[in-house]
Every structure is written in C-alpha cells, then in structure tokens.
C-alpha cells in the first residue's frame, strides 16, 4: 500500500524546502522516496522531482493564454490537472508500484486547501485509484506566534484545512529556528504549540478594538478549543531531531508501515 504526505501551507511557509529536506532525511534512513511537484508556478525546484506537474501545465503559459492573474491562473491550472487526472495517475502509478514514499509539494494558494473542491477531488482520486494513504502536513510560519491576532489566524487556517481536506493532518510551525528574531513571546512556547488555554489571548487580541470585539475573540478561542484536535510541532528543516519527530507523527497519522522485501 503506497503512503505519502501532502505538503500544504500559505505562500513562503517553507513547503518546497521541507519536501527537499524530508526526501534527504527519509533517504538517509533507507526509505525510498519520490517527490512530486504539484505547483505549476514552481519553476526553480529545490529537489529532484520524480514527477513535475509543470510538464502538463505551467502557470506562466496559463496566464499568457487566459489573461488571468497568478491566483486565477493557478486555480485554472488545478482544474486542468483534474480534467487530465489520467496524466497524473499514469505517472504516479509506477512510482507507487516501485514502493516509493510519495511527497506532494503543493501550491501556496490557501483557497486550494480551504475552499477549492477540485484539489480535494484530485487527492481523493489518488486515494481511490492508487490506494494511497495520505497525511496532510500543514506548515505555518512560526513568526505568527509573535502576535495574538496572527496566531489566532494561524489556528483558524489549520482548522479550516483539516475540515476541508478531511485527511489525517499534522500541523507544524515552520522556520522555528527563526522564532527568537521576533522578540519575546507573550506566553511559553508550549502554549503556542499545544493551543490550549486560549482565553489568555482574548485581551491582547482585542487591543485597539471596540469591546464587542472581545466577545468575538472569546468566541473564536472557544471554537478552536472545542474542536480540540489542534496542536503544532516545531519544525526546523536543518535539525535532524525536528524532522525525525515530524516524520514519526506523520507516520502514525496515516498508518505508515514497511514490509522488508525479504518478508513480503
Ligand atoms: N531558517 C529557515 N528558513 C526556512 C526553513 N524552511 C524554509 N525556509 C526558507 O523560507 C523561504 C521560503 O521557502 P519555500 O520552501 O520556497 O516556501 P514555499 O512554501 O514552498 O513557498 P511557495 O511555493 O512560494 O508557496 C526560503 O527562503 C527557505 O530557505 C526553516 O526551517 N528555517
Ligand atoms: Mg514551494
């Protein structure tokens, strides 16, 4: 049974860098991997792609032909990929049959993994047609922890991705090594990683707003706490320890197992 990660997150959150680091990390522990670029705007790949969607559809050409901007063009490209899903299936199948662990590097447009039904259907087709067991790895830049309002936005982003994609999901604060650059945090690092006791943020989230906003902030905190499944791992791609921890959690989330060829 083929396993893999769908790497999602806002623009610049570190997805492609993580995919490259993950491929190196897994290869060094003996797991054979295939990185798939699903981002039609990714023209300077930082890893060796086993499969590159821009061979089917590239963002620049789409924009030229349709007159759309980068966001509209990306949505168009994803819809084109869905229409031509056999192109993807035909190229992915041999990679899964060869036993590779599949890493899908996705575009950064958040509407794709929060609203867009087509992207979700593409992932569903991979699960059904190739029996893939996928886990979504959502990366969010750690610097959002330095501001209560931005931190709440990060929580809501992670939550809505979980609800939309309906995949097992691991959330990580990326570029954690750069967190100190953003000054002292108001709460402990564990607080931000565990996302518990959020009522402590209500006051700082509401500074400068009319009192009614305090109720809104409290309500948002309750929504996240009531959901109860949200927590984050700290991610530094250069730290083997950090990568190992994320891989262990992701493997647990999609039930990864490997049968050595001698026992198969
Ligand atoms: N210090 C540090 N920098 C990182 C880390 N991960 C990514 N970066 C940097 O963050 C920047 C953006 O990384 P990308 O991997 O291009 O981000 P992305 O999410 O793929 O970006 P888009 O595809 O444009 O959405 C690059 O300069 C990376 O070197 C990290 O763990 N630590
Ligand atoms: Mg990228």
Image: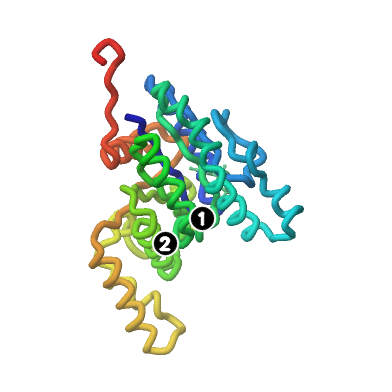
Q: Residue at x 33, y 38 (%)?
A: 133
Q: What residue occupies the far top of the structure in this picture?
A: 262
Question: Callout 1: few (<14), some (14-19), or many (20+) C-alpha neighbours within 10 Å?
Answer: many
Q: Which residue is nearer to you in this view: 233 or 92?
A: 92
Q: Is mark 1 within 8 Å of ligand 1?
A: yes
Residue 125 point in image, percent of width and height? 42, 44
Residue 54 point in image, percent of width and height? 63, 40
Q: What residue occupies the far right of the structure in this picture?
A: 64
- Residues marked 2 and 1 touching at CB (< 8 Å): yes
* Left or right for 176, reference 50: left
Q: Quadrant of the rendered structure where residue 191 is?
A: bottom left
Q: Residue at x 43, y 66 (%)?
A: 153
Quick one: quadrant of the C terminus? top left
- Mark yes or no: residue 180 visible: no
Residue wearing tag 2: 157
Quick one: quadrant of the N terminus? top left
Q: Residue at x 66, y 57 (%)?
A: 70
Residue 249 point in image, percent of width and height? 29, 40
Local SS, label 1: loop
Residue 140 has which mark? none
Residue wearing tag 1: 10
Residue 131 point in image, percent of width and height? 34, 35
């Amino acid at each position: 049974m083929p396993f893999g990660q769908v790497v999602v997150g806002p623009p610049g959150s570190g997805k492609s860098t993580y995919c490259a680091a993950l491929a190196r990390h897994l290869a060094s522990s003996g797991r054979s991997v295939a990185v798939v670029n699903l981002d039609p705007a990714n023209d300077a790949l930082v890893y060796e792609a086993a499969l590159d969607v821009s061979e089917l559809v590239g963002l620049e050409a789409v924009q030229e032909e349709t007159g759309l901007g980068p966001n509209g063009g990306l949505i168009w490209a994803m819809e084109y990929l869905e229409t031509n899903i056999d192109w993807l299936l035909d190229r992915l199948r041999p990679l899964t049959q060869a036993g590779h662990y599949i890493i899908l590097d996705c575009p950064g447009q958040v509407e794709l993994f929060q609203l867009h039904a087509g992207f979700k259907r593409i992932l569903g087709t991979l699960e059904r047609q190739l029996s893939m067991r996928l886990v979504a790895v959502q990366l969010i830049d750690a610097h959002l922890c330095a501001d209560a309002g931005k931190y709440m936005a990060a929580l809501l982003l992670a939550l809505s991705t979980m609800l939309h994609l309906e995949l097992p999901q691991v959330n990580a604060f990326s570029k954690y090594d750069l967190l100190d650059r953003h000054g002292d945090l108001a709460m402990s690092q564990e607080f931000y990683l565990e996302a518990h006791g959020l009522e402590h943020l209500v006051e700082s989230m509401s500074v400068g707003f009319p009192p009614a906003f305090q109720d809104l902030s409290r309500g948002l905190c309750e929504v996240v706490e009531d959901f109860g499944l949200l927590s984050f791992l700290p991610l530094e791609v250069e730290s083997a320890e950090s990568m190992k921890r994320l891989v262990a959690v992701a493997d647990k989330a999609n039930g990864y197992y490997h049968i050595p060829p001698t026992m198969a």
